Amino acid sequence: MPHPPTSPAPRRTPRARRAAVACLLGLMVLALAATGCGRPGSPPVKGPRGSDLPRYPVARNFSLPASPIWRAAARRGRLVVGVKEDQPYLGERDPATGTYSGFDIEIAKMAAAALGFPERSVVFRTIASANRETALQNGQIDLYVGTYTINAKRRRQVGFAGPYYMAGQSLLVRSDEHDIHGPQDLAGKRVCSAAGSTAYQRIRADYPQAVLVAYDTYSVCVDNLLTYQVDAVTTDDAILLGYAAKVPDQLKVVGRPFSREPYGIGVPRGDAPLRFALDDALAAAEKNGSWRAAYDATLGLSGVPAPQPPPIDRYPAG
Ligand code: GLU
């Protein structure tokens, strides 16, 4: 799948490059505090702390017989949720324990509880941006919660509950980059994004002068950015702010968001009863404070105070 850069352009001393690579490895194993990537004296990296996370009461005697997905999940006693594993504060997998954490993971737990599934019966499966629709269509997963933009094209293939968050496309560059301030500055620059993402598609359509590079995941793009293989990484601000917060002395998010990315919970297309039950669950969580508490304990740690969640779009079945 990767379409690697054709002409890497190292512009850094070997020592600086080694430091950048060491930092990235730290980023990927989520052990930055121990790698010494920050400047001496920089504060330890913050991460979601279990104690701050809300608990979601599991619905008792819940039943949704009109939903084929819910029926199958109830029969097997497990709800299988597709997520991301390399997006700080959103969907991260701790390689040591296999535990997933982040705002999307909280949304998934909240949704599962509302459908009658306690946390121990939720199985997370990492699915990349390009494979989401297929995974929902072929029954690999029951739901998908991972920075998944609701749009008309995808709605022809899958269903969406929500939105539960509004992001916007943005740009991540190295701290020593001074020429890129927005998408208008991308002509001739190497720009990395995830295959199958709205971010990739928008650059290809609207900024054709950019030299676009695609990988399966954004963490590989960030790796390429830190090692001077690409000049920018583009995707949602929520995702990029997380990477920047992990190595603030090396990376920065620049400019204003240049799209609207409403995040939805993906479900198989025909299952409107499931979609409506999830809309109800999100509405209840927004009302009773657990949405806010989940945000504050996860995505809020990347530095942006909790926004007002966008209105839920309960579009008709069919
Ligand atoms: N929200 C955008 C999308 O759904 C970009 C983030 C992602 O790839 O998950 O395509």
Image: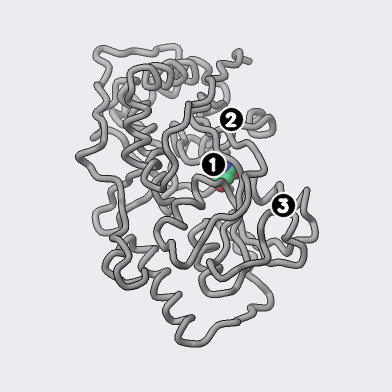
Q: What residue type is disc 1 on?
A: Arg
Give coordinates of residue 85: x percent, y percent.
41, 51
Identity of the residue furthest to the front in this view? 41
The quadrant of the rendering that contains the C terminus is top right
Q: Are the residues tagged 1 and 2 within 8 Å (C-beta)? A: yes
Image height check: is 52 above or below 245? above
Q: What amino acid is at disc 3?
A: Ile
Residue hosting label 3: 203
x and y, in percent, of residue 31 in the image: 30, 63
Q: Which of 143 and 165 is in front in this view?
A: 165
Question: Which element carries disc 3, helix, strand or loop?
Answer: helix
The yes-or-no answer for disc 1 within 8 Å of ligand 1 is yes
Q: Quadrant of residue 245?
A: bottom left
Q: Which residue position is annotated with label 1?
A: 132
* Residue at image location 64% in from the left, 79% down from the top: 9
Whether tag 3 and tag 1 are in contact, CB under 8 A, the answer is: no
SS at circle 2 = strand
Q: Mark 2 points at which residue?
A: 158
Residue 55 position (above or below residue 186): above
